[in-house]
Structure formats: structure tokens, C-alpha cells
Amino acid sequence: MEIKNIPVARLMTQDLVTVSPETSLVEAGEVLLDRDIGSVVVVDSSGKLVGILTSTDFVNIVTNDLATADATVAEFMTESVVTVGAEATIRDAAATMIADDIEHLPVEKQDGSVAGMLSTTDLTAHLAYLES
């Protein structure tokens, strides 16, 4: 199978870290640091994707001194999340990431729940593996 035709489902990270919109910003930041990840998926009580919060968001928060002691994820998450279906190819996913200037692309199931996450790191690791 050509590399461009590999389905996203084969490369995505399935062990997702999720938070709720009500999660404190401090707790979400600790999760990113403790897990050494670049984003958390924000889901509602039914598991549906409602947003994403990334390390880049935290840079913006710190740079602009936006955080308060009681700040929540809901205040800073990106709500209009760009996603891809699990059946999409990595070529399609990579094109989406470039077009939308994003590094973390949630992979959605048909029912709107999140199946996984594809990151630029996942794509880089896959290419490095192919070269070795």
C-alpha cells in the first residue's frame, strides 16, 4: 500500500486524554505536562467532541496574561475543531493539517465521538520508521 493511501486509523493515537469544558485550566495544563502531550480533547458528558486545547493555546494564555485562578477549559478551548474521519487517508489528513495550520487533528467516529488523534509527530514518526 502506498504511503499516501494508508488510513488515518492505522497511525492515530487511540489512547486519548480527554477533559470536560468545566476542567480547570490549571488541571488541563498539568495533564499536558504530566503526559508529555501537545493537546487534550474536550468532550461533553456523552463523549462528543466539543473542543480542543493545545500547548499553543497555553502559550497564548501566558503571553497575553489571560488566565485567572478559576479559569476553565471552556474559556480557552477551540470550539470549531477541524476533524477527519477514521477512513480518511494520511495524505488527506496531512493536507488538512497544512491547510488549517494545525498540528493535532482529532479523528471522529460516525457518531461524533472521538476515535483518536493524529499529530504531526505521528506523521513524522511514521516517515522515520519507513526510512529505517
Image: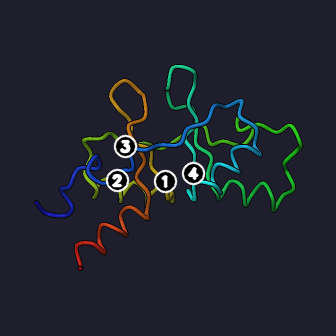
Q: Amino acid at mark 2?
A: Ala
The earlier-in-sequence mark between 1 and 3 is 3
x and y percentages locating residue 54 in the rendered image: 61, 52
Q: Which residue is mark 3?
A: 84
Q: Are marks 4 and 1 in contact (CB under 8 Å)?
A: yes
The answer to the question of whether label 3 and label 2 lie on touching residues, with beta carbons closer than 8 A, is yes
The colouring scheme, among rainbow, by chain, secondary structure or one colour, is rainbow
- Mark 2 residue crowding within 10 angstroms, few (<14) / some (14–19) / many (20+): many
Name which of mark 4 and mark 3 comes first in the sequence.
Answer: 4
Residue to which mark 1 is pinned? 104
Please, what secondary structure does the residue beneath circle 2 have? helix
Label 2, on which residue?
A: 93
In the rendered view, tell whether residue 59 sits above or below residue 89: below
Label 3, residues with CA under 10 Å away: few <14, some 14-19, many ≥20: many
Q: Residue furthest left?
A: 1
The alpha-carbon separation of the residues under discs 3 and 2 comes to 7 Å
Tag 3: residue type? Answer: Val
| The C terminus lies in quadrant | bottom left
Residue located at (71% from left, 34% from top): 23
Residue 37 x, y percent position in the rendering: 55, 56
**Marked residue nearer the N-terminal end (4 or 1):** 4
| Alpha carbon separation for disc pair 4 and 1 | 7 Å
Q: Which mark is residue 80?
A: none
Determine the residue positioned at 84% across, 58% down: 64
Q: Residues within 10 Å of mark 1 (few under 14, many from 20)?
A: many
Q: Which mark is residue 39?
A: 4
Q: Quadrant of residue 58?
A: bottom right
The label nearer to you, 4 versus 3, is 4
